[in-house]
């Protein structure tokens, strides 16, 4: 009676947790802070993110997931354990739960196994994996069970998954190691190159959220933001004003890579499903879907309508939770991996 069905969007930048009948109950950055001298975990999630770039020499902030997959297994396990503690209480912490986790469509078997093993180690009774574009489509309420093409573009922190979904499976997909983090990196490099200013990761992310734009042609200079950093020539703190047009120019490379990947998936799509995509349009999910001008740019480049899903950043987490209620159908479609303490298999 205390066992829960828990869906987890284990993202490079953010972890979201969905619990049946409760919805999204937790949203925390994928960051762990540790004292290198003692090996003690100091903070996980939001508390650890605040420490990035502000810690003394003995304290390090670790992002255990890179490009959508586990880069540091031990820290991932620590992070999952602490986050699950935050959403369970009393007897719920003792019993084992069913857990569904989203992974990039392009993840290897080794990477998938690492996620399943981490879920079992933190106390899962049964652990399941679902590919993120499938989870995003389920969370966005797309009719994936129909014999018709549905196109979803899930833009996360570390990866972008682009897929055509039909009859409960992925017909064509591509997993691109370009996401919100690459946009942040592009802004960092642009500030160094164009303004001789060094800024931090959190500042770059804040710039992207407040005045970021993907569309050079339609970016407006009236959106500006004052930012502070270190002058690379004088070595002193300096403040400058940047515009949305600056940011649109800064993110040219990741934006072009994203558009090229969408076009490649469309080129591989069977003709009948292509006709469905034209009728139904492209659904954008993930935190990166909110970047201003991205949907309009996709429409201009592909001539297919593109819209941002409702609660786009929560679609994968909601999809993982909903998928636990439709395990039999997903198993028949071969859409999930599963594991118990007795073994691991593709269902």
Image: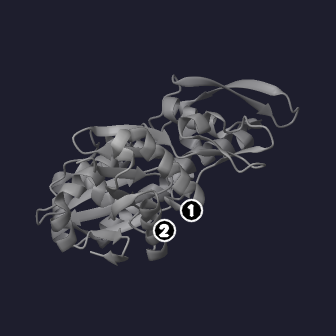
The answer to whether 222 is drawn above or below residue 30 in the figure is above
Q: Kindly identify the residue that appears in the image at 58 percent across and 34 percent down.
A: 47
In what element is the residue under mark 2? helix
Specify the quadrant of the image occupied by residue 55. top right
Q: From the top left corner, tell me how far across and down residue 83 is, in percent.
A: 46, 44
Q: From the top left corner, tell me how far across and down residue 102 is, in percent.
A: 37, 58
The answer to whether 87 is drawn above or below residue 262 in the figure is above
Q: Kindly identify the residue that appears in the image at 39 percent across and 40 percent down.
A: 87
Which residue in the rendered view is the most extreme toward the left? 146
Q: Kindly identify the residue that appears in the image at 28 percent across and 47 percent down.
A: 318
In the image, which disc is placed on residue 73? 1
**Nearer to the camera, 246 or 322:** 322
Task: Tell me the residue that label 2 is attached to.
Answer: 114
Number of marks present in the image shown: 2
For the C terminus, the image quarter is bottom left
Is label 2 in contact with label 1 (beta carbons under 8 Å)? yes
Relative horizontal placement of residue 77, taking residue 332 as reference (left or right) = right
Relative horizontal placement of residue 216, taking residue 320 as reference (left or right) = right
In the image, which disc is placed on residue 106? none
The first of marks 2 and 1 along the sequence is: 1
Q: From the top left corner, tell me how far across and down residue 57 is, in percent.
A: 81, 42
Q: From the top left corner, tell me how far across and down residue 27 is, in percent.
A: 42, 39
Is residue 304 at all visible to an observer of this figure?
no
**Nearer to the camera, 285 or 279:** 285
In what element is the residue under mark 1? helix
Distance between mark 2 and mark 1 Cα atoms: 7 Å
């Amino acid at each position: 009676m205390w066992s829960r069905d828990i869906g987890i969007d284990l993202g490079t930048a953010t972890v979201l947790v969905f619990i049946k009948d409760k919805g999204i109950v937790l949203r925390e950055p994928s960051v762990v802070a540790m004292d290198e001298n003692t090996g003690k975990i100091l903070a996980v999630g939001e508390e650890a993110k605040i420490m990035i770039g502000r810690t003394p020499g003995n304290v390090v902030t670790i992002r255990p997931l890179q490009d959508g997959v586990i880069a540091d297994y031990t820290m991932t396990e620590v992070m999952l354990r602490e986050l699950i503690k935050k959403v369970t209480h009393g007897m719920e912490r003792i019993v084992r739960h069913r857990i569904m986790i989203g992974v990039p469509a392009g993840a290897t078997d080794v990477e998938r196994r690492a996620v399943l093993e981490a879920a079992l180690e933190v106390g899962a009774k049964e652990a399941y994996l679902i590919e993120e574009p499938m989870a995003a489509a389920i969370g966005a309420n797309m009719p994936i069970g129909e014999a018709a093409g549905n196109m979803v573009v899930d833009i996360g922190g570390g990866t972008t998954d682009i897929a055509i979904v039909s009859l409960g499976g992925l017909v064509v997909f591509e997993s691109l190691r370009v996401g919100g983090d690459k946009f942040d990196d592009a802004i960092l490099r642009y500030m160094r190159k164009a303004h001789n200013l060094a800024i931090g990761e959190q500042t770059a992310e804040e710039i992207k959220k407040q005045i970021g734009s993907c569309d050079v042609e339609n970016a407006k200079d009236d959106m500006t933001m004052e930012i502070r950093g270190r002058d690379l020539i004088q070595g002193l703190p300096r403040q400058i004003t940047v515009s949305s047009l600056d940011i649109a120019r800064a993110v040219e490379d990741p934006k072009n890579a994203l558009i090229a990947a969408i076009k490649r998936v469309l080129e591989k799509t069977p003709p009948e499903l292509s006709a469905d995509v034209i009728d139904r349009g492209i659904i954008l999910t993930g935190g990166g879907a909110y970047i201003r001008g991205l949907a309009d740019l996709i429409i201009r480049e592909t001539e297919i309508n593109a819209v941002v899903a409702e609660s786009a950043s929560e679609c994968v987490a909601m999809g993982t939770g909903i998928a636990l209620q439709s395990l039999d159908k997903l198993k028949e479609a071969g859409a999930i991996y599963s594991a118990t303490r007795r073994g691991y298999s593709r269902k």
